[in-house]
Image (cartoon, grey):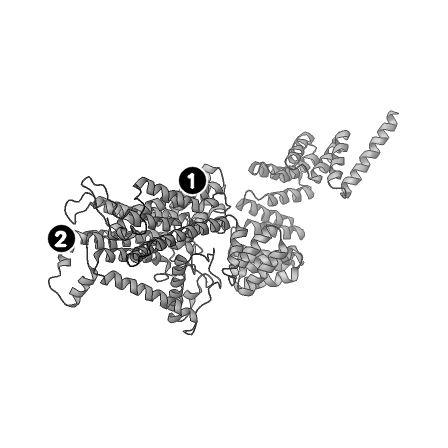
Amino acid sequence: MAELDADLDHILPSPVLPPFWAKLVVGCVSLVCFARSYDGDFVFDDSEAIVNNKDLRAETPLGDLWHHDFWGSRLSSNTSHKSYRPLTVLTFRINYYLSGGFHPMSFHVTNILLHGGISVLMLDVFSVLLGGLQYTSRGRRLNLAPRSSLLAALLFATHPVHTECVAGVVGRADLLGALFFLLSFLGYCKAFRESNKEGTHSTFWVLLSILLGAVAMLCKEQGITVLGLNAIFDILVIGKLNVLEMVQKVLHKDKSLENIRMLRNGGLLFRMTLLALGGAGVLYVRWKIMGTGPPAFTEVDNPASFADSVLVRAINYNYYYSLNAWLLLCPWWLCFDWSMGCIPLIKSAGDWRVTAPAALWLCLIGLICRALCSADRHRRRILTLSLGFLIIPFLPASNLFFRVGFVIAERVLYLPSAGYCMLLTFGFGALSKHTKKKKWIAAVILGILFINVLRCVIRSGEWRNEEQLFRSALSVCPLNAKVHYNVGKNLADRGNQTAAIRYYREAVRLNPKYVHAMNNLGNILKERNELREAEELLSLAVQIQPDFAAAWMNLGIVQNSLKRFEAAEQSYRTAIKHRRKYPDCYYNLGRLYADLNRHVDALNAWRNATVLKPEHSLAWNNMIILLDNTGNLAQAEAVGREALELIPNDHSLMFSLANVLGKSQKYKESEALFLKAIKAHPNAASYHGNLAVLYHRWGHLDLAKKHYEISLQLDPTASGTKENYGLLRRKLEQMQKKDV
């Protein structure tokens, strides 16, 4: 039994669970923590990565996944985030296929099960990291730290910082990356399973571990860091290198350097070479796939990285590290987004917050000194591996090698939290060794686990829908403009425009360059006919971001409403210049041309909209109506039939084409379409009214009377229907008099 396990035996005296039952306990606890999110909605980034991602749909070729980023954009595009995770997107596509569409339950259940499986795998990983690697003569790995590995796995399974990865569907990338990360590490361990001599290894398992690391990177970029952990594990556990002793020999120019001879004889250099070449090769291929270089982020995404002073950048980066450490230590204040002013920049050494990175580095230096200088080989190994697991997977998010697009992201702590759980377990073991109050330590451990489970359940509930998620962030990041923006957007989507305006205004106040908040606020003001302020906001938005196509289009709509037709046309044209495939803008441009009686230009604009988006019902409808109104019935009929072939269940298209057919005296076909439209939308007064007109013309007067009356019941104010109904009644009265 490992020394750490012996220390924990004093505070966890319960009998050691058999491996199967230990894994069952860890798996069940992990499922309990996040089960509440199983029936949640698609929230926050799920909309862009899943609902609006065409790569999930069957009509998109599977090969496109290898040329697109995580959000469905081409990697070669300058606007791509370069997040290349094709295997994660493939699992989304499988979910979409198996569930028959965008039904979030199957996506959420998959995430919950993945976290359960990873937590179970962590039990094996922790048993190696905490207890060492030892196999029986039959090649079966021994668990030398059953208690400490179980405690560490339970701490990992119940850590609340994992909620974003598990309850948010886009967290699938982190879960899959972690899964293959752990499989790569365990595969590397198997390279030494059949070694009869010290230092021998299986090259097959080393190469397979590198391959699994590459697979992990195709799920999430930080997956490749497993090769670094494998290297440290090999050096410390397999090679049994004492780094401090080796450094001392080098500094004192000790010619014996027995460790170097061991490197040569033990094959460690060969394995390190394989890991280095494999990692370099994978990173090179990854860089070539990115195509146009790293992504371009804005200052609001990561303000510290845009600071002019190197010192300011360094201080703020270290402050961010300390906040990440605090989230691991006390995961109570959690937020879906930490950008846009949530964490103001530290600009001077007099800011009291500089004490946080100072405290962090004091702790890290203390741990590193203990890891290097301790006379106990087991303590050195555990501390070094714990720090390695904590730091190495976090490096891609550290801003050290390249700029990242966030300030803090809870999801990137999924793997590093394993290192924290190891350190916490080691701390409990050390504490129990130096105190007699064993029961108090046991109570603290149980208390932490209970509080973590409770926090996971509460936080999972907040991730079930956007309203709860966004509102939960207001108390954590009240200075975050994006939080107020998202609360406003959610209110606007639910029809509460008055409250939405208040939050949008606050978002703009907190960040005067927040163009998306200006755009959405301008849209609401436009709908409320507050056109002057809407125009001011949208004009400011395109001034701040000249390539903001949506704002240009909305500005055009406002200018059209203000009868400033030339300015509106110019705005539409500018929007299309910045986004060539913009069907909605072509649709609005067509409406402008129709208002100006430029019928040919209107038809061309609407045709462009339908070419770019064949299911654009409004554009099809407007084409049919314009051709109908200008007497081009044959062309209107042809367009209507073309539209219904593409959108066969659109009742508005059925209605428009039925009107055209009725005027062409194709009464039977027109009647069928009217009835089909009414079946789809039975409470549309105009549908019944126009069907009544058809019957009126056709001579089916009783049916005409019936549908006129239904139409007037649905809309008693329809003057045209009243007039036609009056004509029909007079005609029926005259017919009755003749019969008499």
Q: Kindly indicate whether the residue at mark 2 contacts the one at mark 1 (C-beta within 8 angstroms).
A: no
| Amino acid, disc 2 | Asn
- The residue lying furthest to the left in this view is 256
Crowding near pointer 1: few (<14 within 10 Å), some, many (20+)? some
Whether residue 412 sits left or right of residue 559 in the image: it is left
Q: Nearer the viewer, residue 470 or 18?
A: 18
Q: Is residue 208 left or right of residue 256?
A: right
Task: Give the numbered dot on residue 94.
Answer: 1
Task: Give the number of the disc on residue 265.
Answer: 2
* Residue 279 appears in the figure: no
**Vertical arrangement, residue 638 with respect to residue 276, above or below:** above
Q: Position of residue 598 (x, y in %)?
A: 65, 51
Q: Is residue 163 above or below residue 566?
A: above
Q: Nearer the viewer, residue 457 or 217?
A: 457
The image shows a total of numbered marks equal to: 2
Label 2 crowd bin: few (<14), some (14–19), many (20+), radius 10 Å? some
Q: Quadrant of the C terminus?
A: top right
Q: Quadrant of residue 485?
A: bottom right
Between 333 and 407, the one lying in front of the other is: 333
- What is the x, y in percent for residue 724? 78, 38
Asked whether the viewer can see residue 721, the reply is yes
Most extreme residue toward the front, as rendered?
436
Q: Which three-letter amino acid code belongs to the residue tagged 1?
A: Ile
Looking at the image, is mark 1 or mark 2 nearer the viewer? Answer: 2
- Is residue 256 found left or right of 336 in the rendered image? left
Q: Nearer the viewer, residue 158 or 562?
A: 158
- The CA distance from mark 1 to mark 2 is 48 Å
